Image (cartoon, rainbow, N blue to C red):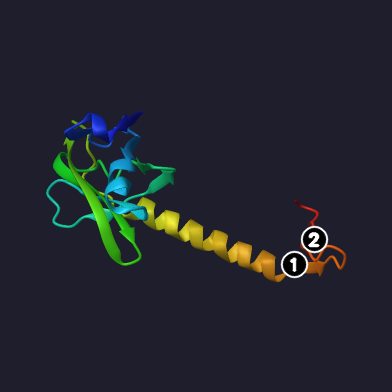
Amino acid sequence: MRINASDYTVIPLGVQTDGNVTEVAFDLTPLIEQAGDGEAVVFHMRPTEKYAYPCLSVRVDNTLVWVISSSDTAISGNGSVKVVLKNGDKIINTLTKATVIAKTFSADEEVPEPYEAWVNQVIQAAADATDAKEELESSTFELDPLTGILYWVREVKDNE
């Protein structure tokens, strides 16, 4: 289930580890109008923890969607989420909201690391970039002498 953060003063993330809320959408338009556009990142501070961590998120136009993982809801109680809009190393705007996670009767004893989903996203992006680099390096380019257009000639492998 996707919820819109702007509809809530305190964002309800559901019951501890139940996976009911799967996405929280943040409208970046007000932040962009105030300070300009940039890279948007979601940070979550789980209940009882002292530090926030970067979360798995996807940006589509002016909407940033936080993809909730089981580690995000592993601890019940009150926490917070911050959306940071930055340009290079400079933070240009932020939005902070409170979060709440209800306690479940069957919570696991072991709490997963909060940043696992984000790290997996970074690892996949690095692998995709490496694959693209290797494909580009093994490609051939041909210049059309009549038009001056440079064409990328890609060799198609049997398994494609």
Give amino acid for label 2. Answer: Glu
Q: How many marks?
A: 2
Q: Which residue is mark 2?
A: 155
- Residue drawn at (56%, 63%), measured in percent from left and top? 129
Q: Label 1 to label 2, Cα distance in Å? A: 7 Å
Q: Nearer the viewer, residue 114 or 90?
A: 90
Instruction: Please tell me in which quadrant of the rendered image residue 68 appears.
Output: top left
Residue 19 x %, y %: 32, 33
Image position, residue 120 (x, y; %): 42, 55
Query: Residue 24's x, y, as percent?
Result: 32, 37
Q: Is residue 103 visible to the viewer in this orientation of the structure?
A: no
| Residue that protrudes farthest toward the right in the picture | 146
Q: Earlier in the sequence, mark 1 or mark 2?
A: 1
Rendering coords of residue 46 (x, y %): 19, 47
Residues at circles 1 and 2 in contact by the CB criterion of under 8 Å: yes
Can you tell which mark lies on residue 86? Answer: none
**Quarter of the figure with residue 51:** bottom left
Identify which amino acid the numbered label 1 is placed on: Ser
Q: Nearer the viewer, residue 115 or 95?
A: 95
Q: Residue, x 42% and y 46% (percent of image)? A: 58
For residue 139, which numbered disc appears in the image?
1
Q: Residue at x 33, y 42 (%)?
A: 29
Residue 9: tell me if it is visible. Answer: yes
Above-or-below relation of 55 to 13: below
Label 2: few (<14), some (14–19) or many (≥20) C-alpha neighbours in 10 Å: few
Q: Residues within 10 Å of mark 1 (few under 14, many from 20)?
A: few
Q: Nearer the viewer, residue 76 or 141?
A: 141
